[in-house]
Image (cartoon, rainbow, N blue to C red):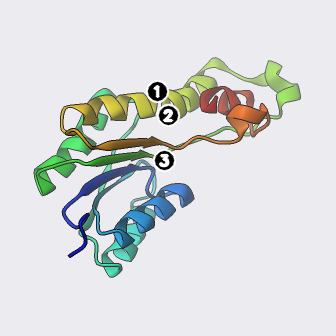
Amino acid sequence: MNPQQSRVAVVSGAAGSVGAACAGLLARRGYRLALHYSKSAESAEQVARHCQALGADAFTVAGDLSNDSDCRNIVESAFQRFGRVDALANCAGTTIFLPMNRIDEADDEAFMKVFQINALGPFKMSRAAARRMQAGSAVVNVSSIAGESGRGSSYAYVASKA
């Protein structure tokens, strides 16, 4: 029996490419999975089916990572189904496409939407998971080279990933 067979992971942004890859890796390692999505239930269900084909018990859960109660619901859904949470992979991310040399065209609302998901989302998910995670649990926050290089799809994205 795989020693990680009973472990449980919550993956935010599981319907996106990075989150889906993370979910697949965890499924191959024997984790049971709560797969968060915010936009495409169809894409999230496809990821869940892929993980299930790899032998994982996986389900999807929707939520807005800028909303504390949604973050708590995502984690609680995993805990209610599996009785534990051992890992949190914060893979969710969003952006706006606005070249850096056009920052004067950026609006506060768009900037805050990106920052809420990319910077505050991992914090809110980690805070929600903290009460359900035990010693030996892990949180992985996925970022981007844009945060280090200062180049990316927009100032909001670069700032949120830094």
Residue at 68% from the left image edge and 21% from the top image edge: 107
Q: Distance from label 3 to label 1 (Cα)?
A: 13 Å
Element at badge 1? helix
Per the rendering, the mark at residue 66 is none
Find disc 1 in the rendering and name its residue. 120
**Is the C terminus in the top left, top right, bottom left or bottom right quadrant?**
top right
Camera-nearest residue between 104 and 155: 155
Residue 155, located in which quarter of the rendered image? Answer: top right
Q: Distance from label 1 to label 2 (Cα)?
A: 6 Å
User: Please, is residue 96 above or below residue 123 in the view?
Assistant: below
Find disc 2 in the rendering and name its residue. 117
User: Please, is residue 159 above or below residue 21 in the view?
Assistant: above
Residue at 28% from the left image edge and 72% from the top image edge: 56
Q: What residue type is disc 1 on?
A: Leu
Element at badge 2? helix
Find disc 3 in the rendering and name its residue. 91
User: Please, is residue 119 above or below residue 42 in the view?
Assistant: above
Residue at 45% from the left image edge and 50% from the top image edge: 13
Looking at this view, name the residue that lies furthest to the bottom: 53
Q: What residue type is disc 3 on?
A: Cys
Q: Decide: marks 3, 2 in contact (CB < 8 A)? A: no
Q: Residues within 10 Å of mark 2 (few under 14, many from 20)?
A: many
Residue 98, located in which quarter of the rendered image? Answer: top right
